[in-house]
Image (spheres, rainbow, N blue to C red):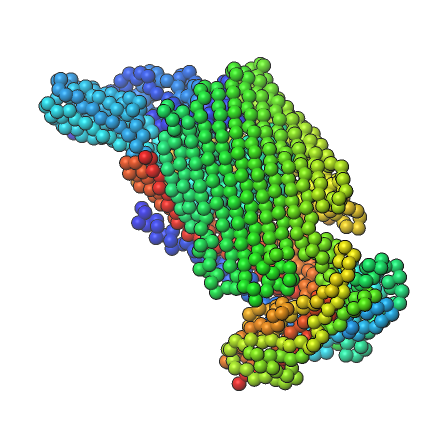
Amino acid sequence: MSPLPPVLGVLCALIAFPARALAGPGDEPPAEQPDQDAIVTGPRVLSAPDPVYPPEMLDSGVQAAVTVAITLDAQGQVTATEILRSGGEAFDQAALDAIAATTFAPAATAEGPVGVMFEYTLRFELTEQTVTRPAAVPPVTGRVRQLGTGIPLDDVNIQVLQTDVAITTDASGRFTMPALPPGTWTLEIFHYEHEPVRQEVTVEAGSTAELDIWLRYLEQPDNVAVAYYERPRVEVTQRSVSIDEVKKIPGTFGDPVKVIQTLPGAARSPFGTGFLIIRGSNPEDSAVYIDGVRVPIIYHLTGTTSVLSPDLISGVDYLPGGYGVQFGRTMGGAIDVRTKSRFDDHKIVFGADILDAQVYYEGNLGRNKQHGFAAAARRSYIDVFIPAFTAEQDFTIQPIYWDYQTKWVPDLGEGHELSVFAYGFQDILRFSSPDDVPQGTDPAAQGNLSTKYQSHRLMLRWSREFSDTLRFDLRPSFGWDRVFTGLGSDISIDSRTWLFQTRAEVSWQPHPIVEVMPGLDFLGGPYSFATRLPFTLSQAGDPLAERDPVSIAGQGTAWSPAPYLNLRLRPLPDPDAWIINAGLRWDYAIYFQEGSVNFGEKVDPAIISSFDPRVSTRLRVFGDEERNGTFKAATGLYHQPPQPFESIGVGTTNTVGAERAWNSSVGFEHRVSPAFSWDLELFYRDMDDLIIGADPEAAGDDFFVNAGEGFAAGAELILRHEPIGPFFGWVSYTFSRSFRRDGPGDDWTPFDFDQPHIFSAQGAYSLPRDWTVSAQLQVVSGNPATPYDFGIYDADADFYTPFALGEPNSVRLPPFVQTSFRVDKTWTFKRWQLEAYVDLINAIRGVNPELTVYTNDYTEYAYVRGLPFIPNIGLEVRVFP
Amino acid sequence: MRAILLPVLLLVAGCPIGNDKYPKPSELTPDWLVEGPKVLAMRADPPEVPPGGTATFSSLVAAPGEGSLRLWLACPPDRALPGGLGCDPTDPDAFIGIEGVLPPTYEVPTGILDDVDPDDAFDGIYVTSQLTLVPEEYLQAGDLDPSTIDPRELRTATKRLVVSDSPTPNHNPEVAAWTVDGIEVDPASTVQLDPGQTYEIGVWLTDGSIEFYQHRNLDGDLEERVEAPYLKWYADSGTILSEASLYPYLTTRWTSPQAGDAPSSGSLWVVVRDRRGGTAWSVLRWTSP
C-alpha cells in the first residue's frame, strides 16, 4: 500500500524539440535552401486542461510517465499519436485523452508554419493537494539562461511546487513571480529543449529574491527525441547527413564530407587521396559543390580534412546518381556541401587535433542583429612534427595546408535573401634532400620538389520570393585557382585559372501540380599555363637523347553556358506522394587557345556541345509521412567535358569531345518507423566516348581520343536508425562491379577502383553526463591490381619495363578492414563548453595494403600499407561571450 | 561505465592484427643488393659507330650462376620490337653471338642512314642489342624449346648502339682505380676491410673519359657540350647508403657486414654511364678478418 497521502494527478509535460518536420502542402522549400528549412519556432501548448489521474489507479499508489509521439500539422492540429513509452494501459489512455483536449500552436520555419513530429511526456505523480495562494510580499524575480552559451531562454515554464503558481519567461529570459509568502519554496523549471531542474528559493519578508537559473541543453538526452530534420526529397537518391551525426563518427576526423564514404555507392578511396569514387566512376567523374557552386577539390592534400571548417557546414547532400539537370558536366556522383546561413549569437570555437588547429566565430552583428557573420581559419602543423621522425633520413618532407572562410548574411526581410561567402585554401608539399644525395640518376630530377595548390572563391547568393508561386535564385561566383609543381631548377608546371560561375534559376508554379524551373548554369573564364621541361616531347623516353630545354606556354578562355529546363509534377493531392522530374540540359563549351603551345599558328577554337535529357520519379506506394514505402526510379544522359590537360591541343585544334554516361536506377525506400528505415537501390551506368590515351602511330596529332567504353552496375542497401533517442547509426552495403575497355573488340578489364563489396557500419550512443561512445567498422574488397612477373632491363636507362603474364587488373589486393572507436566528453560551464575526444582510428586492425610495390626488376613485391593506427586526440572549446 | 570503457578501448587499440601477414616495402631486396643472377650493365665497343662500322658487345652479370648462357641478338630500327623491348627472337638475322663462346659482334649496314634526315643522322639512330641470360637447367635439357621456357627465369636486357655520322662520336669511359677512404686501390687486388665499418668508396676515371662533343640544338646551331656521367653502385653484402652518384661526385658510402655475419668476403661493383651510350664498369673484391 502506498504511503502517500490522498492524491492529485499532476501533469508535467515535456516537449522534445526540434523534432522531425513533415513537409506539408505548399511548404516544400527549394532543394538548395537548406537553412530556410530549419525550424525557428517549436510547437507550443496553447491550452492544456488538467489531465485526469486514472481513478482505478489511485489505490495502487503508482506514479507513471507516458511519452507520446505527436504528429502536428501546419495548422497545429494533432493528426497522429503513438505511445513511445507506455505507463500502463490506464495511464496511456489518460495521456491520449489529455492530448486530445490540448491545443497547440504549430512549429514554423523561416518560411512559415510546418508540420512536425515531436515527443510529449506526461507524468502522473502522486502528491499532496496543497494548493495555496500566497499572501502579498515582495516578488521573486530572475533570469533563465542556457548553460554553456549564456543565451537567455524564452518560454521557460516555472512552477512553484505545492502551489498553482506557474509563469513563463519573456524574450530576455526574465521572469517576475507573483508574491510568495516568506519561507522556502521549490521551483520546477521546464523548457522543451533543456533538462528540467528544481531549485529552492527562500523568500524573506521585506526583501526581493533574485534568481539566476541555468538550464542544460538536451543534445542527446535519454528518452527524449532530438534533432533530426529530414529535408524534403525531390531527387531520386539523395542521402543527407547532419553535422551532429558526422561529428560523432570515428575515423572521419569530424569531417562532414569524409563521412560520405560510409554511405552506399561510395567506394573507399585509397589513404591520402581523398578521391570520390561513386558508383564505379573515375574520381574526376564526380563533382563537388559548395552551396550549389562547383569547386575543384574539397579535401586538403592529406585527404583527411575538407577545406571548410566543420562548424560552418550545415549539412552535406550526397547524390550518387540520377540527379536532375541542375547539375551537369559530370558523369558520376555529386556532393553539395551546404554552409550555414543562420548563426548563433556570438560563438567562438577553438579546435585542435593531431593534424591542425582552427578558430571559428559566428554571430549576429549590428544594432538589430541584422547582420549574420561567420569567419574561420585553420592551419595544419604536421610539418612541425614530421622533421622529428625524419631526422635520421636523407630527406625532409613538409606538408602544409591552411584555409579560411568568411560569410555575411544580412537580414533583408521575409522572402528576400542575400549572402556573401568567401573561402580559400592553400596546400603545399615540399620535399628536399641534401645536394650530395641524388634523387635517382636524372640530373633534371635533382633539387627540391615543391607542389602548391591555391584556390579562392567569392560566392554571392541572392534569392527573392515574389509570390507563393514565383521564386528567383541567383548565385554568381568568382574564383582563382593556381597549381604549381617545381622540381629543381629545370622542371616546373604552372597553371592559373580565373573562373566565373553563375547559377540562376526561376521556379514558377502555374498550377498546384506543375512547377517549371528554367535555369542557367554558366562557367567560364581565362586560363593560362606554362611548362618548363629539360627535354622536348620527342626526347622524352629516350635515355640517350641529347636534351634541349623547352618552355611551352598557352593561354586562352573557355566559356560554357548550360541552359536547362526542369519540369516537376506533383499529380496527387498530397504533393509529396508522387513527384516526377523531367528535364533537358544543353551543355555548350567553346575553348580559345593561343601561345607557344600553338607554335605561333592560329588555331580554331574547340567546341563541344551535348544534350542531356533526364527523368526521375518518386512514388509513395503506401503509408503516410511517418511510415511509408516509396518507389523511385531515374534514367538519363550525363555528359562530361574533357579534363583541362585533355583539352589542350598542341599546335592544332583539340578534337576530344565529351565523355558520356547513361545512368539508370530503380529502388525502394521503406520508412518502418520514425526512427528506422531501409533503402535498396539498383543502378546501371553505361559509359562510352571515354577519353583514353591515343595510339601515337594511329591518332596523328591527338594525345587523347574518345574511344573507351565502360559500365558499372550494382545494388546499394542502407539500414538507418535516425538520431531519435540516445542512439543513431547506419549500416550500408554496396555490391558493385565496374569495367573498362579501350574500344570495341578489346577485353573488358576491371576498373582500377572496382570494389565489389563495400560494407560499413557505424553508430553512436549517448551516455549520461555528456559522454558519447561511437564505433565504426568498414570491410571493403581490395582494389584490382596487375600482377607483374618480371622486367626487361634497359641498360642505357638503368630501368626495367614491367611485364605481366596475367591480364591487367586480374588480381585483387587483400580486403580492407578497419575498426575505429571514439569517446568524447563535454564539460559545460556557464558561458563556455569544453569537449575532449579520443578517436582511435583503425584501432584493431592496423594493416591494410593500399598499393603493390616491386623491386626495380619486378622479381619481388610488397604492399604499401594504408592508414596506421592513429589515436587522434582533440579538444574543442566553445565560448559564448 | 567510463571506468570500464576507456581501459577496454585503450587495450584493444593499436593491436596490429596481421602485421606480419603481408610483405612490407622495407623487406624488399634493395636495388643495389646482388643476391642472384642480375644484369648490371651492357657495353658496346665502341658505343657509337658510323654506317658500315662494327661494334662488339659485352655484359656485366653479377652472380650469374654456373653454366648460364649469355645469348646476344641485334637488330636495326625497322626490325626491333615496339617500345625498344629488344629484337624478334624468331628473326634469324638477329642472332649475333654467345658471350664467352662466340663473341657477339654487329656490323652496321652501310646504307642504314641513307633514308634518314641529315639532322637525325647527325644525332644518330639506334641499333637495338639484346642480351638474354639463359639458366643452365634449360641448357642441360638439350635444345631450347621456347614454349617450355618460363620467362620469369630468364634475365633479359637491351642496349642501344648509336649509329651516326657525328664528327665527335662517343667513346666508352674507363675506370682507372678504386678508392677506399680516399686511398687508391688496384681493382685487380683484394682489399682487407674491417667488419661493420663505413667506408667512403669511390673510383677514378681515366683521362678522356669525360668527353667534349658537339650537339645541334633546336635552333639548328652546333654547340659544344661535356659529358656528365653517373655511377651506380652494387654490393653482395653490407649496406650501400646511396646507390647512385652524379658527376662530379664519384663516391658513395658502404658499410661492411658486421663481424660474425657471413660472408667475410664479397664484391662491390660500379657501373659508369656517360648518358650517350658509353659504359664502363669495375669490380672490387674485399675480405675482412
At a point 55% along the width and 21% down the height, the residue shown is A472
In the image, residue A407 sits, relative to residue A818, either above or below, namely above
Q: Residue furthest left?
A: A205
Question: Who's the residue at 50% across and 27% down the image?
Answer: A33
Vertical position of residue A741 compared to residue A239: above or below:
below
| Residue B137 shows up from this direction | no
Residue at x 55%, y 17% (from the top left corner): A470
Residue B193 appearing in the image: yes
The quarter of the picture where residue A190 lies is top left
Q: Whole-percent x and y of residue A263?
A: 52, 39
Residue A137: x and y, percent? 13, 19
Q: Is B42 on the left or on the right of A1, as rendered?
A: right
Image side of residue B134 versus residue A294, left or right: right
Q: Tell me: A731 left or right of A125.
A: right
**Residue B224 screen position, x and y as percent:** 74, 64
Pick the front one: A191 or B223: B223
Residue B243 in the image, given as x and y percentages of width and height: 60, 69
Q: What residue is shown at x 64% (from left), y 62% (from top)?
A: A443
Front in this rendered view, residue A426 or B283: A426
Residues B237 and A279: in front is B237
Asked whether B149 or B243 is in front, the reply is B243
| Count of numbered marks | 0
Locate residue A161 relative to residue A735 in the image: left or right: left
Q: Quadrant of residue A475?
A: top right
